[in-house]
Image (tube, helix red, strand yellow):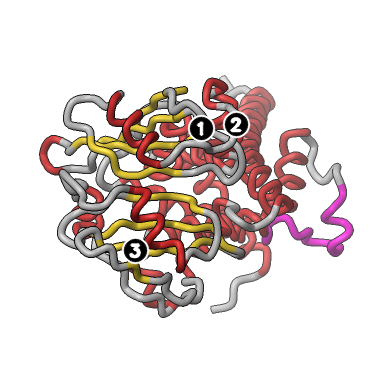
Amino acid sequence: MRFPKQRLRQFWFQVHKWIGLTLALLIIPISLTGSALVWHDWLDEALNPERRVSALVSLPPSAYATAARRNAGPGEQLLSLAYPEAGGAIAATLARPASGGGRPVRTLFHLHPTTGAVLDRSASNEGLVHVMHVLHGSLMVPGVGRQIVGWIGVAMLLSSLTGLWLWWPLKGGFRRGLGWRRQPTTSANLHHQGGFWIALPLTVLSLTGAWISFPAFFGPLAGDPVGPSPTERMRRMAAPPLAATRMTPEQVLAAAEPHAPGPIAQVSWPTAPTGEWKLSYRRAGGSAEVTVLDATGTAKPPRSRSPETTARLMRRIHDGTGMGRLWQIVISVGGIIPAALAVTGIIMWLNVRKRRRSMGQRRGRLQPAPAE
């Protein structure tokens, strides 16, 4: 059965309308938090000015480790030290086991690079940036929140494609579609024009967001290697560092030096059962990891750079990491406009309902009175 163009357009209009009306209250926070998180580092620094320092690293890693442990809470153990790319604070990550065997609660100390003094202390489950990450990734719904966000991404993908279909004029071509006064109200014209200009970036963001939410489904389709299960990832995250190490951080750095491809970025303490120190080094185009066995001091050179998986590419496209300033601006705007489209879509729907109610009342007044 072949649908006439007008009927097909009406069908897609109904799909587009009800996606927007049904999911508007969820699309708005997801879109706005996504827009802000493109500038995660800048936002984190702006909200926490006490962490800003321009001094260069001048202490050995053991000094920073001692300073972090001195300020640690009960049960907290040092996991890693992260070094700034230029001048800045040293980030020491500590963790204590979570009750019930869940995700461990991590604490981040920002240490002065020349004195080791604590500039700021924050927990992994605190702060505005953390709230935005959780809201964007799972709507703060435990357990199934990530899947809910994934299905919203699928709906937004369908909405952006149907919106592009509806934008195309029934009469005339592309240039007519770019005209401002296609509708009688400002909200409708804003919806048409904003929706057109953001349609393709929003399609990309919706697809990559769904990909991130459903890696078990999309990974095999792209031929990505099978990663560890969620249970295995949780077990690795919960693994405590060794209570005592045979090597000092300075000895570990010395053992890894022959294999270092660039400046040090992070030193991670060994955990059971491997007992390996992990040292991350900066290099052109990314990073490289050298491992050192704590028991023997044997260093393993970084593995040859593996090709980027589709999952990593999708995540970089989605959050803008390493994608250049222009794309970061595009996807940041791509988070603001969908929120505005949700608002203008609701206004358009209310305006239509108001006009229909007004027309119904007018028809009622024009009907002749019943004969006596």
Please, which residue is most extreme toward the left here? 100
Residue 189 shows in this picture: yes
Residue underneath mark 2: 55
Q: Is residue 10 in view from this perspective?
A: no
Q: Amino acid at mark 3?
A: Thr
Whether 108 is among the magenta residues is no
Residue at 35%, 70% in the rendered image = 300
Q: Which residue corresponds to mark 3?
A: 291
Q: Which residues are magenta?
A: 164-179
Residue on which the image places disc 1: 113
Earlier sequence position, callout 1 versus callout 2: 2
Name which of mark 3 and mark 1 comes first in the sequence.
1
Asked which secondary structure carries label 1, the reply is loop
Quarter of the view holding residue 1: bottom right
Task: Say if mark 2 contacts mark 3, CB within 8 Å.
Answer: no
Q: Are marks 1 and 2 in contact (CB under 8 Å)?
A: yes
- Tell me residue 45's x, y (percent): 57, 30
Q: Report x, y in % for residue 242.
A: 18, 48
Amino acid type at circle 2 is Ala
Looking at the picture, does residue 150 appear above or below residue 185? below
Where's the C terminus, which quadrant?
A: top right
Q: Position of residue 135 (x, y in %)?
A: 42, 37
